[in-house]
Amino acid sequence: MGIYQFLSGGGEDNESFLEAAKRETFEESGIAVDKFIELETKSSIPKKVFADFRDEKGFYVITEHSFAYELKENDKIKLSKEHSGCQWMNYQEATDSLKYDSNKTALWELRERIRSMK
């Protein structure tokens, strides 16, 4: 899509949100993460954005759940074909580059959580 965005994806079968986050992170980055931080940031996305759900009846929006994890120094990112690249940015660069407000809010929440641990 030519935009900056976090790793993302949906659940399969009866996966929990956390299980889906773990699977999607591995599929899209090649990194097996065992410890996530579930963020409070949630967003509603119109179902029409997702081709697989446009014609589904009985609901209108899909809830986006946000998670974070600490990338370790020895973690090697191997992006799937869904992505064209990744880039290290400071907070302001990332905020300015992200397209979706929900991603910006999740990044803000994560920054605040990190600040509160100091």
Image: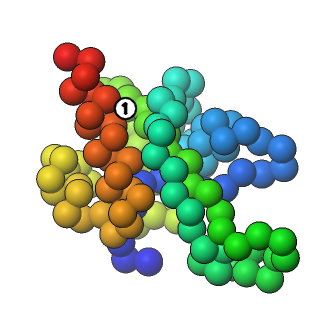
| x and y percentages locating residue 109 in the rendered image | 33, 40
| x and y percentages locating residue 16 in the rendered image | 73, 39
Whether residue 103 is situated above or below residue 41 in the rendered picture? below
Residue 94 in sight in this render: yes
- Disc 1 secondary structure class: loop
Q: Which residue has dot 1 on it?
A: 71
Instruction: Report the number of discs.
Output: 1
Residue 4, by quadrant, is: bottom left
Quadrant (top left/top right/bottom left/bottom right) for the C terminus? top left
Crowding around mark 1 (Cα neighbors within 10 Å: few <14, some 14 to 19, many 20+) is few
Quadrant (top left/top right/bottom left/bottom right) for the N terminus? bottom left
Which residue is rendered at x = 56% and y = 63% of the image? 44
Which residue is rendered at x = 26% and y = 34% of the image? 112
User: Which coloring applies here?
Assistant: rainbow
- Left/right placement of residue 38 relative to residue 5 reads right
Residue 104, by quadrant, is: bottom left
| Residue sitting at the far top | 118
- In the image shown, does 21 or 47 lie closer to the viewer? 47
Which residue is rendered at x = 77% and y = 70% of the image? 59
Which residue is rendered at x = 18% and y = 47% of the image? 91
Whether residue 47 is situated above or below residue 22 in the rendered picture? below
Whether residue 41 is situated above or below residue 50 in the rendered picture? above
- In the image shown, does 38 or 28 lie closer to the viewer? 38
Residue 8 in sight in this render: no
| x and y percentages locating residue 47 in the rendered image | 66, 74
Identified by mark 1, the residue type is Leu
